[in-house]
């Protein structure tokens, strides 16, 4: 229970937020992405990506970095 990300924690995020969820996720149940969609602030982005599983930074690092850089550019972070 101490490791749970609460609704209040998610809703209180004020920084630009991108959640990347792999469509090939096999560790976490799909309903998990819906939890984040429901509680992240309105400006947060949720991207479900085909071909990504539980650890895209190991499985498809170049594609993940591309998504992160695109997000950072669009948000004026880079």
Image: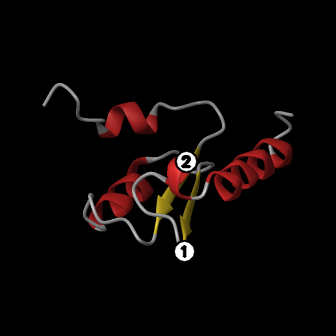
Q: Quadrant of the C terminus?
A: top right
Mark 1 packing: few (<14 Cα in 10 Å), some, or many (20+)?
few
Give the quarter of the image for residue 50. Answer: bottom right
Q: What is the secondary structure assignment of the residue under circle 2?
A: helix
Q: Is residue 57 above or below residue 32?
A: above
Q: Is residue 2 left or right of residue 66?
A: left
Q: Which residue is mark 1?
A: 50
Q: Is residue 69 left or right of residue 22?
A: right
In front: mark 1 or mark 2?
2
Give the quarter of the image for residue 7. Answer: top left
Q: Residue drawn 31% across and 68% down?
A: 30
Q: Is residue 28 above or below residue 30?
A: above
Q: Is residue 71 above or below residue 4?
A: below
Q: Which residue is mark 2?
A: 57
Instruction: Tell me how far mark 1 sits from mark 2, CA to CA.
Output: 14 Å
Q: Quadrant of the N terminus?
A: top left
What is the number of the mark on residue 36?
none
- Report the number of discs: 2
Q: Are the residues tagged 1 and 2 within 8 Å (C-beta)?
A: no
Picture coordinates of residue 70 (x, y %)? 79, 52
Q: Residue drawn 56% across and 68% down?
A: 49
Mark 2 packing: few (<14 Cα in 10 Å), some, or many (20+)?
few
Q: Upstream in the sequence, badge 1 or badge 2? A: 1
């Amino acid at each position: 229970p101490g490791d749970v990300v609460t609704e209040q924690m998610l809703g209180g995020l004020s920084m630009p937020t991108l959640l990347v969820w792999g469509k090939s996720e096999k560790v976490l149940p799909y309903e998990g992405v819906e939890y984040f969609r429901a509680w992240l602030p309105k400006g947060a982005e949720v991207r479900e990506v085909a071909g990504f599983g539980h650890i895209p930074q190991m499985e498809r690092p170049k594609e993940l970095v591309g998504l992160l850089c695109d997000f950072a550019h669009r948000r004026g972070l880079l």
